[in-house]
Image (spheres, rainbow, N blue to C red):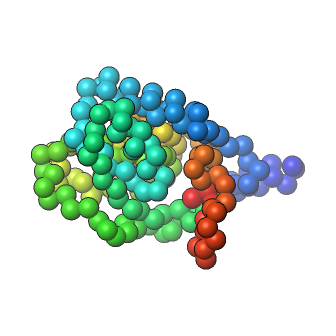
Amino acid sequence: MFYNLFLLSKGVRTLTQAREIMTWESFGVASRELAVKVAQDGYEPDIILAIARGGLMAAGALGYALSVKNTYTLNVEFYTGVDERLPIPIVLPPVPNLVDLKDSRILIVDDVADTGHTLKLVNDFCHGQVKESRIAVLYEKPHSIVKCEYVWKMTDEWINFPWSDKDPVAKREFNVRDA
């Protein structure tokens, strides 16, 4: 315990550090409340753009709650483990073609705005190709370089999501838990 406190005082994350825990039940509440924020703001997206993989569940829930059937997915790789990431986020194929979406309002959805670099990459990708883009996340961290229009909750803790807090059932060379 003392060693963990010492590491935390030096800015080093430990696996025993306090975490924000999201359950499937709290996810249901969070996604509904997030959808209400979008609707009350008067924003009516034509398309929901999910950032895979973390944003897939939230995007689906928001799609239903906001009556948006058109959903796209953008695969971005950045996290490689708990608080471990690549130097920059990388868009993985297939990349959606936005050429026909110049008059569309897009809601970009992810689970968390941690550093904000992934969301910035995706928002920059959409900029100039769509009529308008806004961002909705379940969680935003204070140090994120992107300030999202719609946030369910602010936190500075690592978040355990119900879809990523257990080991994968498929064993592969590149299995990553919590990323």
Out of 134 and 156, give the one closest to the viewer: 134
Q: Does residue 144 appear in the picture of this structure?
A: no
Image point 43% across, 50% down: which residue? 56
| Image-quadrant location for residue 69 | top left
Name the outermost residue toward the bottom: 173
Q: Which residue is located at x 37 percent, y 66 percent?
A: 91
Judge left or right: residue 76 versus residue 179. Answer: left
Residue drawn where x is 68% and y is 43% of the image: 19
Residue at 77% x, 50% y: name it. Answer: 16
Of all residues shown, which one is farthest toward the top?
Answer: 40
Q: In the image, 146: left or right of 124?
A: right
Q: Position of residue 78 (x, y in %)?
A: 48, 63
Residue 125 spot, x, y in % from top left: 27, 58
Q: Which quadrant is the C terminus positioned in?
A: bottom right
- Report the front residue among 156 and 122: 122
Image height check: is 174 above or below 18? below
Where is residue 141 drawn, in percent x and y? Answer: 52, 43
Quarter of the image for residue 173 reads bottom right
Q: How many marks?
A: 0
Above or below: residue 122 compared with residue 19: below
Question: Quick check: 73 left or right of 1?
Answer: left
Does 20 appear above or below 123? above
x then y, percent, for residue 158? 62, 47
Name the residue nearer the viewer: 170 or 101: 170
Q: Is residue 7 at least partly visible in the picture?
A: yes
The residue lying toward the viewer, choosing from 160 and 85, is: 160
Q: Residue furthest right?
A: 2
